[in-house]
Amino acid sequence: MNFTVPDGFTIETAAEPPLVGYPMMACFDERGRLFIAEAAGTNGTMDVLERLQPNFIRMLEDTNGDGKFDKSTIFADKLQIPNGALWHKGSLYVAEPPGIWRYTDTNDDGVADVREHIAGKVKSNGMSSTLHGPVLGPTGVLFWCGGQSGYALDKDGTAPNYRITPGVFTLRTDGSEHEVFSVGGLANPVEVTFSPEGEVFGTVDILDRPEGARHDALMHWVYGGTYNVNANDKNPLKRTGDYLPPLSHVGQVAPAGLTSYRGTQWGDEFRNNIFWAQFNTFKVVRTQIERHGATFKSQDEDFLVADNVDVHFTDVLEDADGSLLVINTGGWFRHGCPTSQIAKPEVKGGIYRIRRTDSKPVEDARGLKINWAKLKERELCDLLTDSRLVVEERAISTLADRGKKAVSELKNILSSSKSVQARRNAVWSLSRMNAAPATAVIRRALNDTNSSVRQSAVHALGMLRDGESVAALSKIVVEDAEASIRREAATALGRTGKAEAVPHLLKALRSQNDRFLEHSLIYALIQIGEPKKTEAGLADSNDRVRRGALIALNQMDGAQLSREQIAPMLSSRDFELRKAAFQIAVKNPEWSGDIASAIHDWIQQASTEDELSFLGEAISSQAADDSVQRVVSETLLNDATPEPVLLTLLESIRRHNPKAKQFPQPWSKAVEHRLHKGTLESRLAAVAVVRDRGLNQFDNLLKQLVKTEKRPKLRIAFISILAPRLSPVDEESFSLLMANVQGEASPLLRLDAARTMTSLKLSEQQLTTLAGALSQVDPLALPTLLQSFARNTNDLVGLALISGLEKAPAAANLSSDELARIFNKFSSTVVFAAQSLLKKLGADLEEQEKHIEQLLAGMSGGDFSRGKTVFFGKQAACSACHRVSGQGGLAGPNLSQIGKIRNERDLLESIIYPSASIVQGYHPYTIETENDFVYSGIITRQTPDAVWIRGTDLVETKVEQKQIKSMTESSLSTMPQGLADSLTQEQLQDLMAFLRNLK
């Protein structure tokens, strides 16, 4: 195993087996002991972990000071799954189901003898995503992350039986003042770290899935912020508009622990850089950040890279001497992990130390030679500028513990010290006291000449909810030159709840368009909750003020908006104000006339992508209105309507109220017209309306169009709608489909033809003909075509199928399990005859491994441009299902950044043996209905009444729950095996070169 670090740095082992096994996350105490949340190497469900309690907290010591740990003690055992550790004031705080715990070793024997559950009742999902933390913020408040499966903030509460939007939480060290700080992500916010001014950064696994691509992220979390969330999860926070964006958007890297580098040993260029571990990519990434308005912009680069796929980095932390510790948990983890399909407990982890080669030894790096108890407050203040990170932090904490005795000296620091570091740290000490005299001194720092000190003071007063600072904060929120300080002032004013701040918050909304600042201003108005004062903003001449007031009032408890206030805004020239007004108006059915009139205008005006998207949502939500139906129909019948508007309207009526039994009459004529006339894309959009709404009034027209239309794609689309009612199947339709599942048709057209074939009720003669043609079918269409035989039990058909598959080269890549399910419906004669074929198709994992290694040896080189041609070409058909940079299909994962998150071996294996590792969210299912129809694909959504399954052709099929006989998860990827067989060695090399460089 080799590691690569930048020039000028070295890496060494700090702890390895048997001293550690599967370390996950860690922290130091003031003595330099390392506390590790460690796994026992066991994967299990929630019930298994609750029963076994296999995991523990390990304490490591470096007894001779050589940088390598040499002594191990189990500090706390019999834990479910601890994820994080924080040493604070003599106790270890740990996130471990069901909440936040405090472990204390009262006799200093290295074993915790007091265990206290101090906060939270979190429902466990048996995975590390349940909860993480805690981490100590600069004001002395604890932060933890997680909660996706449901939680109660009260430790004596009951976690609800539904998902809640995961996020970031804060509480005091005694468990009080427990609240939601921010929410975001579909699954797993992991850990946080802080800027010098107290801003919060964190990592999230699965922030979103645009166009089928999973995105993880590095975040700038702000108070009250809602980032991308699962629409079905309950959100405990009020919304302020669109989701807040992430700081750094990456692919499926599975980010884990992180730290902000605060020391001086690596030089100024590294100070306040964020280092974050990535589980999937065996990397630690360095992110440089700089202020950008009220948030930041970032630049990422690899800092540490391992060459072993079983290395999984889970945490990064700074040691007292300025070195960086990196934790590798090893290969044990599988449960819920999309890239670790096989647990490898034999591959244990370790801890590594990264140093800068020109670093100088730090004398007494932890200040253990200092007699802290005897230091006077003045002497402690001198240590606020100490270059030793641990000494500086301990001085802040010790001064806070001194309370009133230290206030006078800290006041002197704020008024007379020339050091920004000293003044900022004085603010943090005072804020941790949580006492009126200390808070009064912090207010003085609001006038500090340095923006960092000023922002820290604003942040501290906000965390303390200081009502006495409202006048000063109200001035700052409008006048300060720094957007980040205005953002913090807005947050602070909201937390005070003082009504006198409202006019100033409204005035501040006039400032430049900055989503993070806007959020904090609107959220403050919501928190203060003064409808009458906030309504003044609706009459403002500035659209941003009007919109901010509108959103705040809509979310504010006790506020009511009238039609007279909303209706004029539906016609505003400002798109964002129109959108905000509509989102409120749509919840009031009695305002439908105003909405319909506005939609008429929007259809004429829509041109940008945002306007078209909004128009589509508006029509879908209001499609039951007669006047909206009329204007949509008139627009569709008008041949001068721009194509983007046509497609938007057709998609809107396709999505409208799928439970409605009656298709609106005005739309029937419009859809009929669009089936007849238009571009290929618009006519296919009309087909989608008929198919997804289950309309049969167009059957005669479609039968006519099948005969007269020249383009195979449209003819097949028309047949696909008729298929459930086409019995017997005419020879002309059958021949058309047969011709297109073979031959030179495009990949998606072959899939269209194959899927349409499976939806037909073929005669036994037609099935026999199809079986005989399987030898000419490629690996892409063959798995789909097999479903045509799933509803038949005639032995002659079964034997013909066996004969056809034995002659089909593409059959070598089929799953024997899937075939056995089909053959088992026939008589024992067919089942017996199929045994030889099934045995031949059984997977030989050892042979697969050898095959991959042989291919891998010849994968160096390759040409990116030629590989791009292979990817988007007909032969490999990659782009039929996968998207890269906005081009390609959506049936499979988005590959735009695949080279960043998968190594060469993983890429090659996913091409040659796609079922060996299936990406999370793309596990296929097979649904069999009561009338013997079989659907295979990915479950896209489920309700108590129905399941939607998407096949490889991207078509979503709705299956009623009451019609489902069985639904089983398949081990067979929807990507057929064998697609690479048609490629030459050079083409495969080129394809690999293309994929490697998608970053």
Image (cartoon, grey):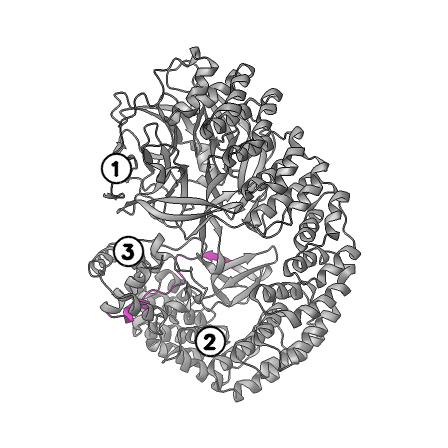
Q: Earlier in the sequence, mark 1 or mark 2?
A: 1
Residue at 64 percent across and 38 percent down: it is 475
Residue at 51 percent across and 45 percent down: it is 295
Q: Is residue 264 visible?
A: yes
339 or 89, which is in the foreground?
89
Q: Mark 3 and mark 1 in contact (Cβ < 8 Å)?
A: no
Residue 50: x and y, percent?
Answer: 47, 33
* Numbered disc in front, either 2 or 3: 3
Q: CA distance from mark 1 to mark 3?
A: 24 Å
- Kindly identify which residue carries mark 3: 904
- Kindly identify which residue carries mark 1: 11
Residue 220: x and y, percent?
Answer: 49, 43
Tag 1: residue type? Ile
Tag 3: residue type? Glu
Query: Which mark identifies residue 226?
Result: none
* Direction from residue 686 to residue 190 in the image, left or right: left
Q: CA distance from mark 1 to mark 2?
A: 59 Å
* Numbered disc in front, either 1 or 3: 1
Name the quadrant containing residue 873. bottom left
